[in-house]
Image (cartoon, rainbow, N blue to C red):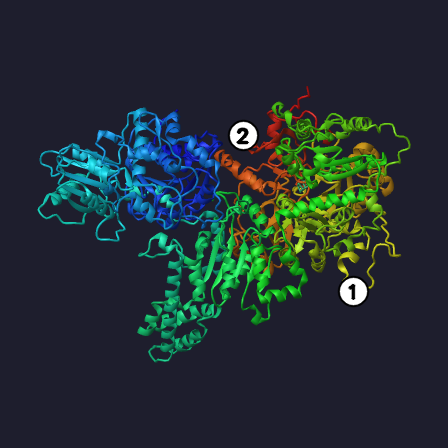
Amino acid sequence: MAAILTAGEAVARIAYLASDVVVSVQPALATDSEFSKFLHQFAAHDASSIICPTTPEILRVRHNADPLLSVYQPVRAGKITSVATSSDILVKSIPHLYRLAQHPVVIHVSLHPAGFPDYSDITSIRNAGFAFVQSNTLQEAQDLALTAHALAIRSGKGVIHFFDAANSKSDQPIQHESRELVTQVLNVDLVRQYQGTKSEESTLYVSEGRSQVRSIGLSGDVLPKANGSTSPPAQAAARDESPAKGQSSASSSSSDRKNSSSAQSEADSATTLESQTKPVSSDDIDSICNSVWSQIRTSTGREYSAFNYTGPRNAEAALFLFGSDPGLFAAEFESATQADFFRHVGLITPVIYRPWLTDRLNEVLPPSVKRIAVLEQVRRKTTKWGPVLLDLLMSLKASDQQQTPLVVGYQLGYIEYTTVTQALSGIFQNLLSKSPIQNLEVGAHQGPSAVLSGVQNEFALSQPKLENAYMKMLDQIFGQRLLVANSLDSKSVVASNATKSSPEFGFGSLLARKEHRQRFIGEVQAAAKTRDFTTDAPLKWLSQWALAAAKADEANKLAPEVINRLSTDGSPTATKLLSSKGLFYKESQWLIGSDAWAYDLGNSGVHHVLASGENVNMLIVDSTPYSERAAHDAARRKKDIGLYAMNFGNAYVASTAVYSSYTQVLQAMMEAEAFEGPSVVLAYLPYNREDDSPLTVLQETKKAVDLGYWPLYRWDPKAEEKGEEPFKLDSERIKQELQEFLRRDNHVSQLMRRHPQFHANLSESYGSEVRKVQKRKAKEAYEALLEGLQGAPMTILFASDNSNAENLSKRLGSRGKARGMKTMVMAMDDYPLEDLATEENVVLITSTAGQGEFPQNGRNFWEGVKNSTDLDLANVNFTVFALGDSHYWPRKEDRHYYNKSGKDLFARLVTLGGKTIVDCGLGDDQDPDGYQTGYGEWEPKLWDALGLGNIEGLPDEPPPITNEDIKAGSNFLRGTIAEGLKDQSTGAISAADQQLTKFHGTYMQDDRDLRDERKAQGLEPAYSFMIRCRLPGGVATSEQWQQMDAISTQLGNETMKLTTRQTFQFHGVVKGKLRPAMQAINQALMTTIAACGDVNRNVMCSSLPEMSELHAQAQAVAKKISDHLLPSTTAYHEIWLKDENDKNVQVAGDAVQDFEPMYGPTYLPRKFKITIAVPPHNDTDVYAHDVGLIAVKGEDGQLTGFNLLAGGGMGVTHNMKKTYPQIGRMFGYVDKDQVHFACEKIMYVQRDNGDRGNRKHARLKYTIDTMGVEVFKANVEELWGQKFEEPRPFHFDSNIDTFGWLKDEKGMNHFTMFIENGRIEDTADFPMKTGLREIAKVHKGEFRLTGNQHLILSNVPSEELEMTKGMLKKYKLDNTNFSALRLSSSACVAFPTCGLAMAESERYLPELITKLEGVVEECGMRQDSIVMRMTGCPNGCARPWLAEVAFVGKAYGAYNMYLGGGYHGNRLNKLYRSSIKEEEILAIMKPLMKRYALERNEGERFGDFVVRIGMIKPTTEGRDFHNDTAELEEDDE
Ligand code: SF4
């Protein structure tokens, strides 16, 4: 084993071996302390502990988050707990120390700043009831850390072990203490007794302060004697056990020992309640330490005693050091010459500082010593005499010596080897003088900065980086006016950083500023009445300003004018006023704090500010993640500042979360500022570590907000005066405590009465019991339903992610019924597990998720079955059918994941005594008919086994309802959508309507980030709707942009997505807001009809109007085709656009019938997409669509027509080779006036020939491949009555966007800006949405959406160019200086809203690119574009199959990788690796990119390169996609 190099490591190892829980106090969660690195390493490697039966828990706590509060919970749970911390936290933790001293807690303290710490951190807490052990060398750090743990365990009391790490930094490495010795010393038997008893205490305050009744420590300890036998501790203490170094022991029972400096008095003075067990005396501590040290001595030969004395036994003078670096002094003494004052002197240092063992001191102190210099490194001295000096005086007085030595105290400053001789000379010169002077200072005041820049600097206060988000927003709103009174960088010379950042300091300074300004206003008013100015102008401006001084807007508007007038005046009065010119502006004054303030409200600045009633704004950032909300630990639960402030009654209070609603934060900040009186803005930013990714923070925030743990609200107690509601709930749900407050509050009770809907929000309960009750009710209802039926019961339980297992189960249920059984079908997690043993026949059907796990709705069931110890299934007949994919995990070693969930379940039920009906069935996606193949064999066996195999006359099974049935029965897309929208009992709509609403441009989705948590709470998923607009060619006016912006803010989730098909998409629109959103879109002269569904969708067109005339003509064609192919149903208008009272509204079933001349009642078999590309740009991926039109330019530069491609398409299903992406095949040239007819006829042939029986095979690409290109084309030509001409020549340069400014042929300017993955949103770093909105207010041209999800600010006249550039710059929208790799990337939406997503996409691709950019830079490829795309599933919304490199989601965190697409979007790529995670992606991509940089031919594209070097075979067309993939899938053995 490697040697130990630092004291931190030595201590960390012992703490790890000797604890169940180690509280690791760190400067920041992402910054290590000298202990934490090692602690986490041990835990990460699952290193075994001696005390903890499993891996000890390492609890990270920030040093400013009341760290010792975290100790109570494990201690109460009977866990041996220790703390590893710096000394900075000790004084602040005094209230905890008093309580914790009564538990066997060890606190290892590294004194800070190392090298020159202030020992007052130790002396100030010396009476808290702890025993104190000090170490100096590296070896001591290890041995005394062990001593501390043994002492705590054997005494049952708290022990503080402290050391200055700098003292041992030059020590030689030491060996690890042997585990045998550690085990022996710790007394593991005693520990087990302790761990076996849990404290009855329920709160922090009950019975704290009492000695513990647990059998640990002296109540039950049996101390080993030096010879290894054992004896009870009291006796051991009484016995004259020989002290270290053979000094004679003082009489342990001497009553003199119980003087005021004895441990008993100190330990007990720490508590006021009587002990129930024998109190621990200083004798006991002494005796335990001696016993431990005797064991260490026997094993290692190293000796320890309570005081360490070095020097001659006949020394006449000695130095007692309570400070840094005894080694330095000892060395100096050793090398002293005859000339030195300090020759022949001794050095004493305490090893046990508390209890102060007088006798031990007297033992080590040679009787010859007549004078003692006491050096105390105590900077915060509150008394004239240092605490150690007093200890020593008491000891010496109590000693038997006839003549007590003379004691002289010194305050020790910083001493190093160059100054030590001089310092010691001074000390001893004074000491040995006739009348020594007390309290002399020796050494330098300050330690060197080099010493201070060590570890402890990391403990310096700094704002965690993540928390800057809110600061940036304050800055964004208030700009120059912002004043953060307790900011760390404020230029206060008098205050330390710790003081400056405190709310009290900030508040004080704000009050001072306020008074100062008030005075200044008085001065201005007075000056305005004088004639002291040279000119007249200042008078008018000053009096105007004085009137407006209190109003920020007006005062700040006037300020520059006033200053201007005063500057030109030049009079002494003007000069005087100008000397404080900053006061002409009214600041926005803020105090910023963290949730650490929340722990003790009464003492904090929050309370002071509220109580003062002053107009001060507070922003309090809370970073406790929802999942770590420590609800189980009442002691750690924070006070609710919001509630506290509302109860106060006079404050504006807002609860906000930047990752939930950016707009609400802005609004709250502005309202807080405008509020006359104290304001508290609570800002949520949950993170575990400061370097957490934004995605983690976002997910945590969403959970907390959605479930009411962190509700969003604003409370303005003065709102009623303005006729407004005082409380505004900005999120859906609130927690119990807040709800109670609101109920008590009169205003809100009235509010709730007025708005019953609001009341429902407030009073909706969510508790852990709800789910259980629901399950039972559901099952009972089902049973009641079955009551009347005859036959044997059969319970069918399923776990299903993609509804295959669910559908199979339902079908099995109906077949069972048909055979006379009483069948019940439910999801596993909906079934009350405790009933399982009472079932007769159970069939379990599960699919397989991830690495052989259960799907989401079976996980709890499986956990219950797996962990149950009392489930007896002896009377249960059961079987299992599992669905999986044998090739899902291509590596051999992962094969066991295949159908693992089902197999595990089967095995476990057998173990629990269940009797198998038939063996576990296995369905494999790889079989010819997928899982149906295996199921088809298994199900008959099941009926046979149940004796129901050959039943005659079974009724025909109703065919499953298909999309075709839904369309046909929908009455031209009406269904029951209108009724469903009115149903307020659910956020969802019916399954059939979910299909139909797609035709209206909206999908139902649920927030997948919240699924698990909501399920655990017994809530339905967080349903909301995605709305997609129809925007031919992707062109929107500025006004439309603003309208879209407003819709997303008011009705959606505040963001909008620019899609790969050039349109706007809104997410997070809840059902109640769906109609208003649709109406708003229509008011913006847009529509959503046929934006999704089995119809012709939005028609795309190349975006950049480089050749403006040609482009405008192509654009007009896009619009013409779009309009031409629109469905005719009036259902859209009727459902969404007419108001509630319109009598003419047609509802389903009315006599009026629509007519769809082009589509007919069942519309198309599948979606149908058309796009136009204007060469040389293939920015719309013309090959990827059902119909691709390549614009052809005539000699005159005008549009003549198009080359038409048909049958492109992207959707694929993983591992289903029948599905493949395809590129459009060239049909030929069509004239521009005919092209919409050609499209129409292609649509007809597809309508009549597409595969309506299988949606996975229904796209045009399959119809063409099935019919053959020529046959299909002939059919089209026949309907059309015309022929396609020979295609005209064309040429593409790229399929990505051209970023930056471009001037078109008419001199108009266009700017293509980079919008990462098309997401328009505001973040604290980049308020892009705000910027675009502001630009839209003045921009007279258009906003063009590109097919790569970027945005073009189009048609900027040259005279407005500078102004536009200025605005783009202001909002940082002009930045296109990204790597070409990033600029060429795109990703689909995927999580959290897309229901089909298997992996992250839009939220992850930017991170992946960041990780690749290092190599890009290294290889000098910053300007080299590589088309990289990512999608969350193989549906291919971001057209991944045409990218040079693509990642397609397979499972959460796992992707299939594809290589070899053509740069111009002209060649499909091919599978290179399947199911790889980030590590493997980087391991492949990094060397590959380097290789590309080095080995590529001139101008060779990445996709072509990987083909040339043989990494991947080219895909010639779709049907070739699955052939010759790079990864050969192994056959099953
Ligand atoms: S590709 Fe898949 S995951 Fe991505 S948005 Fe489309 S359907 Fe959803």
- Which image quarter is the C terminus in? top right
Q: Nearer the viewer, residue 582 or 950?
A: 950
Figure check: 542 above or below 463: below
Q: Quadrant of residue 938?
A: top right
Q: Residue at x 73, y 33 (%)?
A: 845
Q: Position of residue 37 (x, y in %)?
A: 42, 36
Element on which disc 1 rests: loop
The reply, left or right, for residue 33 in relation to residue 1257 is left
Mark 1 highlights which residue? 1141
Q: Residue at x 80, y 54 (%)?
A: 1131
* Residue at the right extreme of this rendering: 953
Q: Are marks 1 and 2 in contact (CB under 8 Å)?
A: no
Question: In this orientation, does residue 412 appear?
Answer: no
Q: Position of residue 100 (x, y in %)?
A: 40, 45
First in sequence: mark 1 or mark 2? Answer: 1
Q: Residues within 10 Å of mark 2 (few under 14, many from 20)?
A: few
Mark 2 highlights which residue? 1483
Q: Nearer the viewer, residue 1303 or 1101?
A: 1101
Figure check: 1086 above or below 1141: above
The reply, left or right, for residue 399 in relation to residue 1164 is left
Q: Nearer the viewer, residue 1330 or 1069?
A: 1069
Q: Residue at x 60, y 48 (%)?
A: 1319
